[in-house]
Amino acid sequence: MSTQHESGLSLLQVSQERYQDNPYLLYHQLRELDPVYWDEQIQGWVLTRYKDVIKTLRDPHFSAVRFNFNVDWLPPMFQEVVQPTIYAITRQMLFLDPPDHTRIRSLTARAFTPRVVESMRNEIQQLVDRLLDQMQEKGQADLMADFAYPLPAIVIAQLLGVPPEDRERFILWAGDLSMLLESTNITEDDAIRALYGMREFTEYFRQLIAQRAQAPRDDLLQALINAHEGLDKLSEDELLSNCMLLLAAGHGTTTHLLSNGFVALARHPEQFAWLKAHPDQTSLAVMELLRYDGPVQATSRLATSDLEIGGKHIQAGQNVLISLGAASHDPEQFADPDVLHLDRKENHHMAFGQGIHFCLGAPLARLEAEIAFRALSQRLSTASLVDEQHVQWFSGMVFRGVSTLPITFN
Ligand code: HEM
């Protein structure tokens, strides 16, 4: 392609060790080099400027139908087994355009209302307190394993009415699904395992849905089953895809908001002290933690017609990588973008996306994080990591987080 750069820079390099701690360095380099960058290695355009990101996510000429998990390499017997799972993933609203997207999102939103989220407040507070009590007793803890990982999983499991004894399986399925969605470096064995996990998940939820027909309950799953617009309802396949999406979209993301946010606070003791002194400002602080180091760094779209972004000609069918992390650190939009200001006002970051696919779970994620960070800042005298230098990031093009986070509970 004539627009190829000789720099050899690629968004794929974000997985390299030198950018793991700070991918924003790479995004700044890409933006300075060319804010609408043809990435030869990805074979797609990479957008790093706030204004291009927001415009593209709002533009109906870009399609979200982009999930393309090729299973041709699997033996035919496996292909048959996993095909329904692949189909279920492609029917998630995140990978659909209007009118299908509009229909499924609006039925889901009827069940997953702000009232349902708010009704979880006390339960989330109790859960946070219980998990922190257990950590405090031990003195030292892994904030990931003991807190950030179980908290959102238990919340979604509770919302969907998954019994406590099945939560462990539920958490494993969450891992399988994120692996499939971030499928750039996945091995054959992992893919097969994850696809089988998803098959178990759909079978499990098929049973749960059938049970609800006999014995209705008051939870989100029931509300999704009952949600209707006139005669229109979610089909069983759509219900399954939706449950899978709520799990996939709501678990790892919230986990990594908690962990990335904690690392940011540990590295900025003066900001932690500010939070401690201003517990009523925690909601504002969470918005800044989302901007500063969000768990979802990028999304993608396909151009459906020839069009122009920032003077570049994008051809119909070409892939566009939208860097949400870069947009949230664009100096044209944010003063001192790489500085953590917990009291930052007018913080229109891109961590939850934009446009018709704007995160449906944003109120829940914000509520969980608000309760969690308020409790952490009130209980801990400082946010201390056991080994600040060796935080193990896993930072891919799409998701960013840490795998363990040993902390001292002081
Ligand atoms: C900090 C936590 C979270 C972050 C950073 C996050 C981020 C995002 C982003 C960036 C998108 C849009 C992707 C795109 O346009 O391609 C999205 C969509 C979505 N998120 Fe979240 N999310 C979080 C938590 C949650 C939670 C807790 C739930 C639900 C339990 C959830 C459910 C969804 C759903 C259903 C969509 C698809 C919306 C649509 O396609 O219309 N998310 N999320």
Image (cartoon, rainbow, N blue to C red):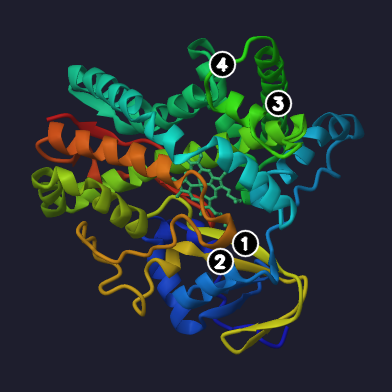
Q: Which of the two discs, 4 and 1, labels the residue nearer the N terminus?
A: 4
**Vertically, is 40 above or below 85?**
below
Tell me the quarter of the picture where residue 248 sits: top right
Residue under label 4, please give it.
Answer: 217
Give how far apart the Cα atoms at labels 4 and 1 are. Answer: 37 Å
| Circles 2 and 1 in contact, beta carbons < 8 Å | yes
Q: Give the amino acid type for the residue marked by disc 2 in the picture.
A: Ile
Secondary structure under the numbered disc 1 in the rendered image: strand
Residue under label 1, please give it.
Answer: 300
Q: Nearer the viewer, mark 4 or mark 3?
A: 4
Q: Which of the two discs, 4 and 3, labels the residue nearer the N terminus?
A: 3
Give how far apart the Cα atoms at labels 4 and 3 are. Answer: 20 Å
Residue under label 2, please give it.
Answer: 322
Q: Is mark 4 within 8 Å of ligand 1?
A: no
Which label number is shown at residue 165? none
Instruction: Work out whether residue 213 or residue 267 is closer to the camera in this orientation and state it.
Output: 213
Q: Which of the two discs, 2 and 1, labels the residue nearer the N terminus?
A: 1
